[in-house]
Image (tube, rainbow, N blue to C red):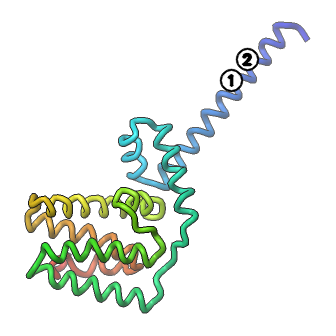
């Protein structure tokens, strides 16, 4: 084999390896985008690096894989749904307290399902693995709850937070009809 044939072979091999690496990275990105939805873009923006974001999301997926996430038993689900309906019913008379109770109930149902209840960002990140579209509602509702605690949220903001929390709650409780049946104050959505 001549030197020029060897060089051409090495160059072709290098291009093949580069193409394979590019394809593998592209497939990894597509898989993570598909799994995490909008949370993928939020993480890329947060980290400032696609590579760092993807590493963070893969690490998060491995973390959550070790959790024992369970569906709620029927009796527990019924208790949580009844508690949610009581909170929603109180919203009209006391929206501020209802929002605080809703936030607490979200944490209780997460704990009952098997999610560790840590600080908010970790809870949201953990939820994003299995509920990538719903976690946006959690972030939006929590943001309003934080503004409420600072005295910077209107009653309409609180109503929006309850709607966000209801969407998350219905997903966690396995009760999708909750999101279609009533809005935060008991009115039709």
Name the residue: 32% across, 85% down: 81
Name the residue: 49% across, 55% down: 35
Q: Quadrant of residue 171?
A: bottom left
Mark 2 closeness class: few <14, some 14–19, many ≥20 residues within 10 Å = few
Q: Is 180 or 74 nearer to us in this picture?
A: 74
Q: Quadrant of residue 142?
A: bottom left
Measuring from the top left, give residue 159's x and y in whole percent.
15, 70
Most distant residue in the right direction? 1
Measuring from the top left, give residue 44's x and y in whole percent.
41, 42
Rendered image: mark on residue 11:
2
Most distant residue in the front direction? 118
Position of 15 relative to 114 (above/below): above
Element type at marker 2? helix
Q: Quadrant of residue 41?
A: top left
Measuring from the top left, give residue 16's x and y in whole percent.
71, 27
The quarter of the picture where the C terminus appears is bottom left
Asked whether, in this view, residue 151 is left or right of residue 18, the answer is left
Q: Which residue is mark 1?
A: 15
Most distant residue in the top direction? 3
Name the residue: 27% across, 70% down: 165
Q: Is 161 or 29 nearer to us in this picture?
A: 161
The quarter of the picture where the N terminus appears is top right
Asked whether, in this view, residue 3 is left or right of residue 140, the answer is right
Mark 1 closeness class: few <14, some 14–19, many ≥20 residues within 10 Å = few
Measuring from the top left, give residue 71's x and y in whole percent.
49, 79
Report the Cα–Cα distance between label 2 and label 1.
6 Å
Q: Are marks 2 and 1 in contact (CB under 8 Å)?
A: yes
Position of 45 relative to 59 (above/below): above
Asked whether, in this view, residue 134 is left or right of residue 73, the answer is left
């Amino acid at each position: 084999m001549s030197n020029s044939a060897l060089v051409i072979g090495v160059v072709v091999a290098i291009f093949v390896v580069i193409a394979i690496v590019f394809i593998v990275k592209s497939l990894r990105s597509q898989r993570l985008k598909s799994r995490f939805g909008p949370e993928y873009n939020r993480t890329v923006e947060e980290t400032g690096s696609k590579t760092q974001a993807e590493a963070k999301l893969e690490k998060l997926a491995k973390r959550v894989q070790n959790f024992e996430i369970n569906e709620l038993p029927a009796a527990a689900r019924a208790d949580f749904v009844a508690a949610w309906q009581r909170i929603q019913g109180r919203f009209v008379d006391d929206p501020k307290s209802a929002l605080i109770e809703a936030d607490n109930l979200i944490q209780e149902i997460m704990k009952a399902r098997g999610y560790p209840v840590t600080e908010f960002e970790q809870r949201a990140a953990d939820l994003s693995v299995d509920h990538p579209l719903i976690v946006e509602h959690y972030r939006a509702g929590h943001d309003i709850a934080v503004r409420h605690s600072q005295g910077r949220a209107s009653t309409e903001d609180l109503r929006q937070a309850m709607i966000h929390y209801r969407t998350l709650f219905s997903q966690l409780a396995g009760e999708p009809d909750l999101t279609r049946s009533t809005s935060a104050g008991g009115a039709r959505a």
